[in-house]
Amino acid sequence: MNIDFPPPSNGTYNNAGSSRRFAAYLEHEDLKRMEKGIYTEGFFNLTEKNLYKSQVVKNIDNNRAQLMKTDAKFYAIHVSPSAKELQLMGNTEQERAEAMRRYIREVFIPEYAKNFNKGLSADDIKFYGKIHFDRDRSGNNEGNMHCHLIVSRKDQGNKIKLSPLTNHRNTKKGVIKGGFDRTSLFQQVEKGFDKLFNYSRPLEESFEYYNIMKNGSIKKQLEIQEQQITHEKGNKRDNQQVIYSENERKKQQAIKEQEEINIQKEKNPKRGIRR
């Protein structure tokens, strides 16, 4: 699962003003799909779906009390499952879209709220999601479904400022209380996905492995590679045991069937031809 926080810019991700431009960008795929007669997904939040862009823009833009002109008013987040993860989320676009909404509502947003260390819950986060099915222009869209989130800078009550881009993590002293630990978020939403969709994730597909191999010390990298090798050996032994057990089961079944045939022969012996 790839979680990305695009940095604010002067273009699509300009978050110092209205959310209208970003919301309009999120609808660009709908026009192409409607031209082809393919169904589209509206915006959704914690409890509703098929919401209109106008509702999203109005609610985000009106939730900015005490923010300065140049302050961020909202943040963009990308949530992109891997091809393997998408397979667990359903077989059709509709099934996967429903699974994505469930994941965002039940896993991602609750963990997002918790990571501010302010005692917040999913109900405190004002957000809207938009599911896309096409990630490139290659024409091969299989496995490309992902979700864009617009998250308000202020909580639902329009009182608390929340920034997932802060470098503070869990500050308990000084002016800034709380913070946001993105590393913890990535780990927790991955665990939440695996639990929700009953996925036994290989070590090499985990955020922990990726993060250590990219940012960790040589010692940490060697340690996790050793751990991966150990896991692979264990999995190989488990697979061999499964194969052995299955072969043994088939063998015992064949013996049982042959015994039943022999019993039937004893009960009904063939009689010779009388002359």
Image (cartoon, rainbow, N blue to C red):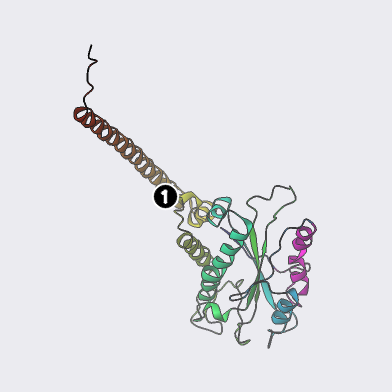
Q: Which residue is mark 1?
A: 223
Residue drawn at (56%, 63%) of the image: 99
The answer to which of 254 and 166 lies nearer the viewer is 254
Is 252 on the left-hand or right-hand side of 106?
A: left
Residue drawn at (19%, 30%) of the image: 267
Residue drawn at (65%, 50%) of the image: 142
The answer to which of 119 and 24 lies nearer the viewer is 24
In the picture, the quarter occupied by the N terminus is bottom right
In the picture, the quarter occupied by the C terminus is top left
Is 70 on the left-hand or right-hand side of 79?
A: right
Give x and y (percent) for residue 184: 50, 66
Is 223 on the left-hand or right-hand side of 26?
A: left
Q: Which residues are magenta?
A: 8-35
Tell me which corner region of the image, top left, top right, bottom left or bottom right, holds residue 105. bottom right
Give x and y (percent) for residue 231: 39, 46
Q: Is residue 14 magenta?
A: yes
Look at label 1 and name its amino acid: Glu
* Mark 1 burial class by Cα count in 10 Å: few <14, some 14-19, many 20+: few
Q: Secondary structure at mark 1?
A: helix
